């Protein structure tokens, strides 16, 4: 009986915080999304491939920074604030939010209405808050060494290396095609975006591996 009461108290303590975390992230996300959308459009128009990469890097940095602020303000949890950690933090958040939003997209596709939108918004405030806290917890500052503990393990390291190599290869090929297009060849627009995405994934892979390597050296 005591255990059930403690569980109930725990849920009453956690659920409002998850809701507030998700709600604030949605509000910040809407405002930031509009601003970054304009910036990203301008960067792509004026700087093409480089602008696309810079725009996504800014987006991921901002997502990581916002979640760091909310983790500290709502949960009193200190999250690493160096730019490399914030970049990977934001990238992981973007992927996690994209995955959990798939059911919402499907529901809205077949049952689009104002009540559905309101109900989904309320539900996803809890879901997004939980996801944001869970992702942010991977970047908690270690009191012992004062940095983020990142341990990929053998399988995780091998996977990141494989993705980084594949993305780097695609980026190199894309750059060669870009040079060819500058010399008069034709380059489909979607290949330009794929090249930018490959370069971004390559950069993130290198950063993740460098952070993991630093942690392994610290443990040794």
Image (cartoon, rainbow, N blue to C red):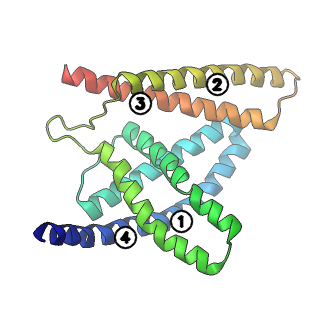
Task: Quickly name the residue at label 4.
Answer: 20
Residue for badge 2: 171
Disc 1 from disc 4: Cα separation: 17 Å
**Label 1: few (<14), some or many (≥20) within 10 Å?**
few
Q: Earlier in the sequence, mark 1 or mark 4?
A: 4
Q: SS of the residue at dot 3?
A: helix
- Is residue 23 or residue 195 the one in the foreground? 23
Q: Is residue 79 left or right of residue 33?
A: left
* Quadrant for the N terminus in the image: bottom left
Can residue 35 be seen in the rendering of this structure?
no
Residue found at the far front of this picture: 1
The image quadrant of residue 105 is bottom right
Q: Is residue 187 left or right of residue 30?
A: right
Q: Is residue 102 visible?
A: yes
**Label 3 to label 1, Cα distance in Å?**
28 Å
Mark closer to the chain start, 4 or 3: 4
Q: How many C-alpha atoms fall within 10 Å of the one at disc 3: few (<14), some, or many (≥20)?
A: many
């Amino acid at each position: 009986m005591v255990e059930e009461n403690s569980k109930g108290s725990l849920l009453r303590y956690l659920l409002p915080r998850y809701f507030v975390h998700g709600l604030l992230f949605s509000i910040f996300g809407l405002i930031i999304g509009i601003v970054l959308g304009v910036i990203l459009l301008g960067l792509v128009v004026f700087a093409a491939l480089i602008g696309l990469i810079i725009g996504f890097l800014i987006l991921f940095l901002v997502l990581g920074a916002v979640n760091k602020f909310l983790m500290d303000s709502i949960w009193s949890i200190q999250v690493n604030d160096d730019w490399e950690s914030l970049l990977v933090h934001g990238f992981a958040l973007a992927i996690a939010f994209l995955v959990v939003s798939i059911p919402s997209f499907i529901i809205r596709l077949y049952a689009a209405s104002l009540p559905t939108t309101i109900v989904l918004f309320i539900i996803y405030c809890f879901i997004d808050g939980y996801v944001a806290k869970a992702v942010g917890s991977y970047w908690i500052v270690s009191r012992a060494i004062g940095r983020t503990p990142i341990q990929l393990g053998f399988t995780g390291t091998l996977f990141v290396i494989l993705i980084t190599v594949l993305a780097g290869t695609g980026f190199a090929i894309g750059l060669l095609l870009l040079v060819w297009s500058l010399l008069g060849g034709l380059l489909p627009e979607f290949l330009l975006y794929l090249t930018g995405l490959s370069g971004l994934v390559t950069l993130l892979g290198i950063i993740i591996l460098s952070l993991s390597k630093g942690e392994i050296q610290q443990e040794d």
